[in-house]
Amino acid sequence: MPIVDAVIRPLRESELTTASAICRLAFATFLGAADPENLWPGREYIRTRWPADPSACLAAELNGSVVGSNLATRWGAFAFVGPLTIEPTLWNQGIAQQLMCATTDLIDSWDVSAVGLFTFAQSPGHIHLYQKFGFWPRFLTALLAKPPMVQSAPFTSYSEATDSERVAIIDACRDLTDSIYDGLDVGSDIRSVHEQQLGETILLWGGTSLDGFAVCHLGAGTEAGVQICYVKFAAARPGPGAERVFGRILAACEALAAQHALQRVEAGVNVGRSQAYRTMLDWGFRADSYGVSMHRPDSPAYNLRDVYIVDDLR
């Protein structure tokens, strides 16, 4: 097919419905889903991420219409890309490359130390596209799920804190993640989930220090979808007690799901974090599917054997 020149620019708020529809259609087409509307019911990526940083959501425009988009997310010194989606009738015409070029330029301006993304391990086309921009496949990422079996577990919530306490909580979360990977900071996601009422951040304290936390999306209109608690990010403080704390985090996430009468807990983990992966399997999580994480530069970032972090970079 001929290469077309699209206009790459920030996505506008008025275009979120169009971009979200293209995102759902693109995934449904690739996955062979017969009914795009029923693929991931109630799950939203673009509508939830745009308010957090509109400048990091890029649109591809052709003949005056949005035909695709790509998102970038910054977690302090680490960033990730996606989902990158194009109207299926315009696949293989260079628009994805144009979006990726603009996205990597944007991320380069952030001066982060590493960038990652999640893609389909079974798709050479996706992997080859991202390799053109310096991303290299690393370990598999498991997309795991289980029904919530734990009905109650001790934790405190970000939403229950006062404004001044929330400032201290963000600082404590940053201190914890920075102890795992220099500069890692998911404070923007914690604030966004609270401000948009997408879910909850649960906190596990050990005296005056934060032992672990989890940022969870809950139900329809979020990145979780109907009847799902999605653990977008969770981390346990490194050290001898990390595995025990990680188990407490998983229990708290299940209890949160049960409190909201949700039927399923979903959480992804890179298998490079082999101890966290095995702990989740021992906890009863099972894989729905596997993808592959790709990194620029070709290094593990925080995907190390003894790191207890939950995320999947979708």
Image: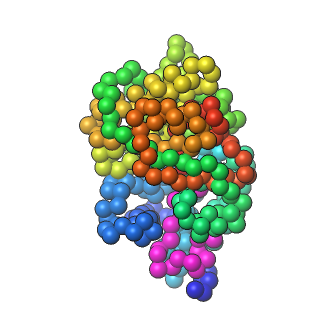
Q: How far from the left and from the top, in percent, is residue 143?
A: 46, 47
User: With 247 as the anchor, is 10 left or right in this view?
Assistant: right
> Which residue, as the protein is rendered here, is positioned at the far bottom?
2
Q: Is residue 161 visible from the viewing direction of this image?
A: no
User: With 104 as the anchor, is 82 left or right in this view?
Assistant: left
Q: Is residue 88 magenta-colored? A: yes
Q: Viewer-proximal residue, 297 or 285?
A: 285
> Which residue, as the protein is rendered here, is positioned at the far top?
207
Residue 80 position (above or below residue 212): below
Q: Is residue 12 visible from the viewing direction of this image?
A: yes
User: With 195 as the anchor, is 277 left or right in this view?
Assistant: right
Q: Viewer-proximal residue, 51 or 225?
A: 225
Residue at screen point 58% across, 37% down? 274
Hey, which quadrant is residue 267 in on the image? top left
Q: Is residue 301 magenta-colored? A: no
Residue at screen point 62% across, 48% down? 139
> Which residue, as the protein is rendered here, is positioned at the far left?
261
Q: How far from the left and from the top, in percent, is residue 14?
A: 43, 65
Here the colouring is: rainbow
Residue at screen point 68% across, 58% down? 135
Q: Which quadrant would the N terminus be assigned to in this image?
A: bottom right
Q: How far from the left and from the top, in percent, is residue 21?
A: 39, 67
Residue 280 position (above or below residue 36): above
Hey, which quadrant is residue 227 in on the image? top left
Report how many numbered discs are placed on residues in the image. Answer: 0
Q: Viewer-proximal residue, 230 or 17?
A: 230
Q: How far from the left and from the top, in percent, is residue 157?
A: 41, 27
Range shown magenta:
81-97
Residue at screen point 47% across, 80% down? 89
